[in-house]
Amino acid sequence: MEETDMCLQVTIPAAATQQQLSGSCPAQRLDPQQRQALAIAGLAGTPISQLAAEHAVSRKFVYQQVGKAEQALDDAFAPPAARDEQVLFYLPVTRRWLKRFVLAVLLIGHASYRGVVELLRDLFDYSLSVERVHAIAHEAMDRAHALPPPSLGGVRIGAHDEIFQGGQPVLVGVDVASTYCYLLSLEEHRDGVTWGVRLLELTDHDFAPDAIICDGGSGLQAGQELALPTTPRRGDVFHALQETEALRTYLDNRAYDTIASRSKLAQKLAASERRCGRRSATLAQKLRHARAAEAQALALATDVATLLDWLRHDILALAGPCYPDRCVLYDFVVAELEARRPLCPHRLGPVCTYLANHRDALLAFAKQLDAELHTLAAEFQLAPAVVRAVFDVQLLEATDTRRWPREAALHQQLRGRFYELSQALTELAGHTVRASSVVENFNSRLRNYFFLRRSLGADYLHLLQFFLNHRRFLRSEHPERVNKSPAELLTGVAHPHWLDMLGFTLAPN
């Protein structure tokens, strides 16, 4: 008996193993479609024993297939609330991960220290002190300060400006093409010496731009003269037009006020005549003066509006006459405004002085534009006037009825070369810089982080500068900038995630 049992124990597993290896097990031979049909039949009420006998499988196997089908149906028809409760993934939270999270919430989410503490308490049920948040931020700040800056040789046009936080000036410098911030320094003063020292420090990192664009700040200009005397300076067209638009608005409002005053006096005079049966000499005299003031205010507002329209749409516009003609027109506009200065000295005076002092800087872009248009004319073997005509037509709005007849005539004239020339001129227009809008936009982003100064101190700017330079853009009007950081756009070299660069890396899975 023992020998028989022993024989069975040896032969039966061997037979089973041979059956599995040969693939003769009926359950294994069923393909997915057959298993699905088996499960559906079981759900439909067919006896399990019958299904097992028909397919030569065990009842346990049939129950397994029916269970899978029931689970699939439950998942398919589960209510939304049940789906919301499903676990999407599990997150291994470590101390290193917490450091990354704290920095991300501070810099990406603009959260305060106590906001980070509250977020961890409410969502992660984890207690972290404000002091610990400060220690993590301070550690990141020290690491950012220790990292060497990249070469600034790729900066072609820099935009400079000054902002204030806590009553102290912050000197800002941004590359127009990549929006890389190469200067972000909190200073005691914003005079020429301070600007000059900071710009000289940048030259140690190959900073040699083709031009610098800035507003009319005296310290900023003096610092550039000290540190970069040969670098051309371009005036900020935006600030100039902002000054003139404020003048236009004031004169328009004053003209409306004179109209209202004259209308009110006329109504009073008419009411006085109805009551007394005669005209009031005093009111009549006031009405005569009011009509004269109204005519003068309307004429001044109209004349100044016309002059400022010429300045905006013809002289300082991208499409316009050549540089010498722009200078003549600019001087004419300034002279006409100066002639009307006595009519509104407190408003016209500052604008006239500003425009007279900044003519060369405001029109510097036009001189460079002329040179580049002449270069393209020589490259395409065309007259400069023809190239400028194509350039001017391209800058007209698509809804402008003047564009299409002119473009058709130029297309006929430049048959075979129009498209290639248009592409070159479009690229030229995109690279011609007239305003420091980039640095103004950058300043608006900086103001959202001034709260960090109260906790980290003035050196927080090093961390902020690093973050803004190495954070990749999620979206952009320019496709080539998407998923790239300003540092990558400036240098052309990819870099790791900004948290990894600071040393807050995660352990590999």
Image (tube, rainbow, N blue to C red):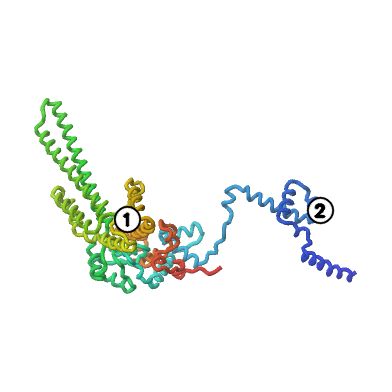
Q: Is residue 151 above or below residue 288?
A: below
Left or right: 266 with respect to 314?
left
Left or right: 486 with respect to 324?
right
Q: Is residue 110 above or below residue 276?
A: below
Name the quarter where the N terminus is drawn. bottom right
Q: Is residue 474 visible?
A: yes
Measured in 3D between alpha carbons, the distance from the residue under mark 1 to the one under mark 2, in whole angstroms, is 85 Å
Question: Residue extending furthest right?
Answer: 1
Expressed as whole percent of the image width and height from the top left, the position of residue 206 reads 33, 72
Residue at figure coordinates x 34%, y 51% from the top left? 407
Q: Is residue 242 visible?
A: no
Left or right: 236 with respect to 123?
left
Q: Element type at marker 1? A: helix
In which quarter of the view is residue 256 placed?
A: top left
Residue kind at label 1, given as amino acid type: Phe
Residue at numbered disc 2: 53
Residue at figure coordinates x 49%, y 69% from the top left? 505
Expressed as whole percent of the image width and height from the top left, the position of residue 421 reads 36, 58
Asked if the residue under mark 2 is in contact with the one under mark 1, i.e. CB atoms within 8 Å, the reply is no
Local crowd at mark 2 within 10 Å, few (<14), some, or many (≥20)? few
Mark positioned earlier in the residue sequence (1 or 2):
2
Local crowd at mark 1 within 10 Å, few (<14), some, or many (≥20)? many
Relative depth, front residue between 231 and 385: 385
Question: Residue extending furthest left?
Answer: 281
Residue at numbered disc 1: 391
